[in-house]
Every structure is written in C-alpha cells, then in structure tokens.
Amino acid sequence: QKLIWRTWNFHPDAQMDYFLANGRRAMEENDFAAAESFLLSAVSLDEQFSQAHFYLGQLYYYRGDYAQSLEHLDQTLDSQPEHFAAHALRGLNLMQLKSYSEAESAFQETQELLPDFSARFLASDASAARAMAFGVKMPFVTTT
C-alpha cells in the first residue's frame, strides 16, 4: 500500500509537493485554515490532480463539512476510481449524513479494492451502515 500512496502523491511539479506536504502537516496540527490554504493552492496548480482533492476531502471531513468533503472525494474518484481511501472516507461522510445505504456501498467498494487484511476491518462498517439503513440503533456509532 505504501507504493500506491507514493504513486497517488506523485506530481511532476515540485510546488505540488510543497503544497501537499504543508497542507497535510497543517491538518495533523489541527490548523485547518492553513491546511485549506495550502490544499486549495494545490488544486489551483492542477485541478485534475486527484490527490489534492482527496486531502481537501479529508480536511472537510475533519471539519464536519461532509457535503463539501464528498464533492472533493467524488472528484478524486472521477480520475482515480480505485482510490480505496477515497471510497472509505466517502462512506464515513455518508454515515454522518445518515445516507446509510450509500455508505454501505462505499464500504463494500473499499473492501473490493483493498487487500484482504485491511478489508476485514471495513466489514463491520458496512454491516453497521446496512443495519442503520433499516433503523437499527448501533452502539458506539455516532452521527450528527
């Protein structure tokens, strides 16, 4: 999976590396305003670069802007349909928006793309989404 992430993060313009690295670092430090600035600069540099959209999707998820997160994750998946992390994050956003059937589909898509070891952890997310779609209350699953 490390090779996949390196491939997704690769961009021929060194300026992109600067924006992504600083955007991710700011996100890790919970400086969401700085992270957004760097990541929007990355998107401005190359609107087609899917990884910049992925990190914006991640940032907006952390901020609770689920609809905006989904917009960027969809842009990621338009150009990188095998981006398993975008599918998984899409599922988490959909859970927060109470779109449980769609969340289940996103988690199932992630399972299909991930190696067996990692996919096992998503089976419970897909099951929770399926149950919540039918109105079952799930312990320890919170949505806003």
Image (cartoon, grey):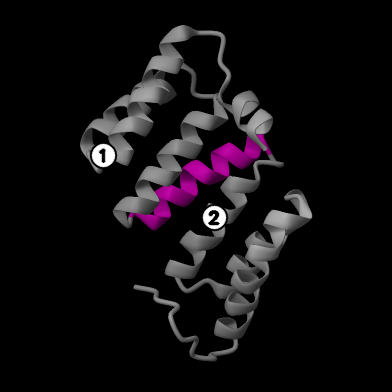
Q: Where residue 4 appears, x then y in whole percent? A: 67, 32
Let me know if residue 56 is in the magenta part.
Answer: no
- Give the amino acid type for the residue marked by disc 1 in the picture: Glu
Q: Nearer the viewer, residue 91 or 75?
A: 91
Give the structural element (helix, strand or loop) at label 1.
loop
Q: In which quarter of the image is the C terminus?
A: bottom left
Q: What is the chief secondary structure element of the magenta stretch? A: helix
Foreground disc of the pair 1, 2: 1
Is 20 on the left or on the right of 7, as rendered? left
Q: Give the class, few, some or many, for how many residues have Cα within 10 Å of label 2's Cα (few <14, many ≥20).
A: many
Is 53 on the left or on the right of 82, as rendered? left
In three-dimensional space, the C-alpha distance between marks 1 and 2, rounded to whole angstroms, equals 23 Å
The structure residue drawn at horizontal position 49% and vertical position 18%, both measured from the top left corner, is: 46
Q: What stretch is highlighted in magenta?
A: 65-80
Is 6 on the left or on the right of 13, as rendered? right
- The answer to whether residue 109 shows anywhere in this view is no
Q: Which of 112 and 64 is in front in this view?
A: 112
- The answer to whether residue 63 shows anywhere in this view is yes
- Give the amino acid type for the residue marked by disc 2 in the picture: Arg
The structure residue drawn at horizontal position 46% and vertical position 86%, both measured from the top left corner, is: 139
Let me know if residue 66 is in the magenta part.
Answer: yes
Q: Determine which of the numbered discs, if any, sits on residue 29 in the image.
A: 1
- Residue topped by disc 2: 90
Give the structural element (helix, strand or loop) at label 2.
helix
Q: In which quarter of the image is the N terminus?
A: top right
